[in-house]
Every structure is written in C-alpha cells, then in structure tokens.
Amino acid sequence: GEDVEQSLFLSVREGDSSVINCTYTDSSSTYLYWYKQEPGAGLQLLTYIFSNMDMKQDQRLTVLLNKKDKHLSLRIADTQTGDSAIYFCAETGANNLFFGTGTRLTVIP
Amino acid sequence: ETGVTQSPTHLIKTRGQQVTLRCSSQSGHNTVSWYQQALGQGPQFIFQYYREEENGRGNFPPRFSGLQFPNYSSELNVNALELDDSALYLCASSPGVNPYNEQFFGPGPRLTVL
C-alpha cells in the first residue's frame, strides 16, 4: 500500500525559513497535499500541488516536488511562532488521503 | 456556512464497551470520511460514506461500522473496544467522492479506552 514518510521533529528560530520534507510511494498520485494540525483543531489544508508541477508558491509557502525521487517539501519563509504545529503531507488514494506521520515544527522566539 | 462539527469532544470508555461518535458535515457536502489518528501518528482512513452508502473502506475490522443519514451527517460505531482504539477520530466532509475534492476536517473527539 501507499507509504508516506516524514521526519518527526524540526526546530527553527523565529524569522528563519523552515523546510519540511516528505517521501511518498504512489507515483500515480495526481495531487499531493500539506496539512497543518494545531492542538484541539482539525486538519487545515495549507496548500497542494499537481503532480505535473515542480513548484508552487503561495505567500510564505513554497512547495517543491521531485517526482523522479518521489520527494515533496514545504518551505515556510519568515517562520513565526504561530507556525508551531504538526505538518502532514498526504497523497490521494482511490477515495481517501494517505497521510505521513507528521513533522512537529517548533518555532523558538 | 458552518464547518464540520463532531461530538462528543472527549470520552473515556473501558475495554469491551461500545462507542458512537457523531459528525455533522459542512453545508452542501454529501460525502463524509472517517479517520483514526493514534498519538504520534498520521490519520488513517477508516471508511467513507456517500449518499448514505459506504464508498470505500480502509484496513479496519468489522467492529468499526458507520452510518450516513439523509442530511449527510454521519456516525462511527466501534464495538468491543480495545486499548489500541484509543485515538483521535477525525471526520472530514467534501462536496463529492472525487478524491481531489478538498476535505474539510472536524477537530475530532479523543477517545480513551481503559
């Protein structure tokens, strides 16, 4: 089945850039997603990228996709304390999403 | 437009008991998916309901069952609870079964099984 992997933890200083990485296995996924989860809240869709794109930029967020290596990354520019959360990458299945284990981002003031 | 709401918010059960979790989908959404998120893990797909019928199921045993009502709200029922069922149960609604439709997630109740 699909397998989506992420590193578990990332700490950055406020104002620096954060890069969260993800590898996936299903090369037929058309969309790949980044979700954010804050304590007590549901998953919030941050951004997504089509599989035929290499890069997508959305304000402070940049998504890079290397389809050959099945590698996806999320860069957050000028990271703020409000960005502290767990970030999940996800790929589409037949009628559902397959999520990674999540990366806990801690922003140090 | 109201978002996805779930009830209850927290609950504690003992092993062997049964639990029912409820989800109200976002206005205009006819598809509801349920996910289980164990502590420190990513959400795992349990099943999806579309227009009151099950439309896909993940790798969960039959003691996990569900319903969808004519107003598209949904229930997740778990029988014979086990300790490993302790998790956050997320409900997501979307405007159709196309997997590329954005799914809107509720905050999920956290179930603790003792």
Image (tube, rainbow, N blue to C red):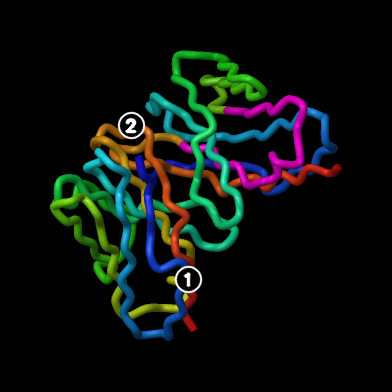
Residue B4: x and y in percent read: 37, 49
Q: Nearer the viewer, residue B25 or A86?
A: B25
Answer above or below: position of B9 versus A2.
below
Query: Disc 1 is attached to a residue of which chain?
Result: B
Position of B39 with respect to A60 (left or right) is left
Residue A40: x and y in percent read: 56, 57
Quadrant in the picture for the C terminus of chain A = top right
Q: Quadrant of residue B36?
A: bottom left
Q: Are marks 2 and 1 in contact (CB under 8 Å)?
A: no
Residue A83: x and y in percent read: 69, 39
Q: Nearer the viewer, residue A103 or A107?
A: A107
x 35%, y 38%: residue: A93
Quadrant in the picture for the N terminus of chain A = top left
x 28%, y 42%: residue: B27
Q: Is B66 part of what is drawn in magenta?
A: no
x 60%, y 49%: residue: A38
Q: Quadrant of residue A62?
A: top right
Q: Amino acid at mark 2?
A: Asn
Q: Give the structural element (helix, strand or loop) at label 1.
A: strand
Q: Give the structural element (helix, strand or loop) at label 2.
A: loop
Q: Which residues are magenta?
A: A72-90
Q: Is A84 part of what is drawn in magenta?
A: yes
| Mark 2 burial class by Cα count in 10 Å: few <14, some 14-19, many 20+ | few
Q: Nearer the viewer, residue B95 or A104?
A: B95
Mark in front: 2 vs 1: 1
**Residue, disc 1:** B10
Position of A88 with respect to A95 (left or right) is right
Q: Amino acid at mark 1?
A: His
Residue A46: x and y in percent read: 54, 32
- Report whether mark 2 lies on the same chain as mark 1: yes
**Residue, disc 2:** B101
**C-alpha gap between disc 2 and disc 1:** 29 Å
